[in-house]
Image (spheres, rainbow, N blue to C red):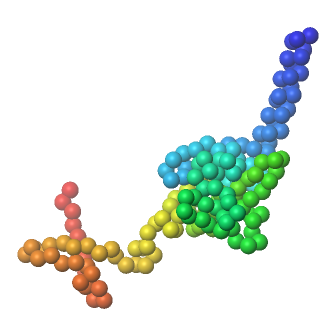
Amino acid sequence: MPGKLLWVAIGILLTAVTSYASDQGHAVVVYDGAPSEVATSSATTNDLWVTVKDLTRATRFVVKPQGICRDELCFPIPKGRKADFLSKRDGVEWFNLSEFARLVKQPFARDEKNGVWYFGKREDERGTYLASLEAPNFTLPDISGHTHSLKDFRGKKVLLITWASW
């Protein structure tokens, strides 16, 4: 009798795990250079839906009434698009991390075969030099030892010639 009861319990457990696994999988998210294993929803194959708990653990972002926040930084969810970012199924709240990346102009790549998602730097983290096409100021000596700053030549055409000896 105890053996039969054990097999019934194992059968119930396998049924529950299979049901859970059919709606949920796992992926590795690389965010800020740190990998985290997260539970994923199979509701869609093109987007990465993670639990809100895993969102915070993997990215340090938290869902708040004012938006998706991390420390002092908050990104509001656009009006009428809450369903694109948040979903609740079977008592679990899911967050669409790939849609959030699109919102904040954050590049990402997906290795579907290995279940890995890599998220690059957000637009606000990449700096403004490339966006403005303005080189940062620097000061260097010329061949005679006189120092010159790039800011002294603002508004003029400048040809910079560089070389390396390594």
Q: Residue furthest left?
A: 144
Instruction: Report the side of 143 relative to 119 (left or right).
Output: left
Residue 87 pos. (x, y %): 78, 57
Q: Residue at x 86, y 19 (%)?
A: 7
**Quadrant of residue 142 within the rendered picture:** bottom left
Instruction: Report the side of 56 relative to 140 (left or right).
Output: right
Which quadrant does the N terminus fall into? top right
Q: Residue at x 83, y 38 (%)?
A: 19
Residue 108 pos. (x, y %): 57, 59
Is 92 drawn above or below residue 99 in the view shown?
above
- Is any atom of residue 97 visible in this view? yes
**Quadrant of residue 65 within the rendered picture:** bottom right
Residue 13 pos. (x, y %): 83, 28
Is 164 drawn above or below residue 25 in the view shown?
below
Q: Residue furthest right?
A: 1
Q: Residue furthest top?
A: 1
Q: Residue at x 25, y 79 (%)?
A: 150
Which quadrant does the C terminus fall into? bottom left
Q: Nearer the viewer, residue 79 or 73?
A: 73
Q: Nearer the viewer, residue 88 or 33?
A: 88
Is 94 drawn above or below residue 18 in the view shown?
below
- Is any atom of residue 47 visible in this view? no
Q: Residue at x 57, y 68 (%)?
A: 105
Instruction: Report the side of 154 relative to 77 (left or right).
Output: left
Is 133 drawn above or below residue 41 in the view shown?
below
